[in-house]
Image: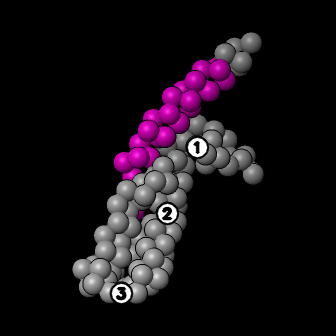
Amino acid sequence: MGDIFGLAGKMKEMQARMQEVQESLGKITETGEAGAGMVKAVANGKKQLVSIEIDEDLMKSSDREILQDLIVAATNKALEKVEERAKTELQKSTEGMMPNIPGMDLEKMFK
């Protein structure tokens, strides 16, 4: 019986740590760039777009399609980078708490 109580305690500890990590994901940010840095997008670890910067020269351009494409590209790059960083942070925070179970993806807990 002692093992069951010990396991329950570990699960509570892990839940608390996972909650802390989830809250901290909003503070993690990454920037994606497109058009040689003419468009920059910043996303957070909760996969939310935080800001967009557009070079003034692009704002004067009459080609909306290019601007739209650059915004999408920069946003996608930022989201890819922040997803990878969030995954790394999650792994760091749960290190040693759970056994390495093949196929278990902790990232799904935050979706």
Q: Percent from the top left, x then y, of residue 74?
A: 44, 73
- How far apart marks 1 and 3 lie (CA) works out to 41 Å
Q: Reply above or below: 99 against 30.
A: above
Q: Which residue is mark 2?
A: 79
Pointer 3: residues within 10 angstroms few (<14), some, or many (20+)?
A: few
Look at 24% across and 80% down and name the residue there.
56
Look at 47% across and 40% down and name the residue there.
21
Q: Which residue is mark 3?
A: 62
Q: Percent from the top left, x then y, of residue 14?
A: 56, 31
Q: Which residues are magenta?
A: 6-30
Look at 75% across and 51% down and name the residue there.
103
Q: Amino acid at mark 1?
A: Phe
Q: Residue furthest top?
A: 1
Q: Amino acid at mark 2?
A: Leu
Q: Amino acid at mark 3?
A: Ser
The secondary element bearing badge 2 is classed as helix
- Residue 85 lies in the magenta-colored region: no
Q: Percent from the top left, x then y, of residue 111?
A: 61, 45
Q: Is residue 55 visible?
A: yes
The secondary element bearing badge 3 is classed as loop
- How far apart marks 3 and 2 lie (CA) works out to 27 Å
Q: Which residue is mark 1?
A: 110
Q: Is residue 36 left or right of residue 1?
A: left
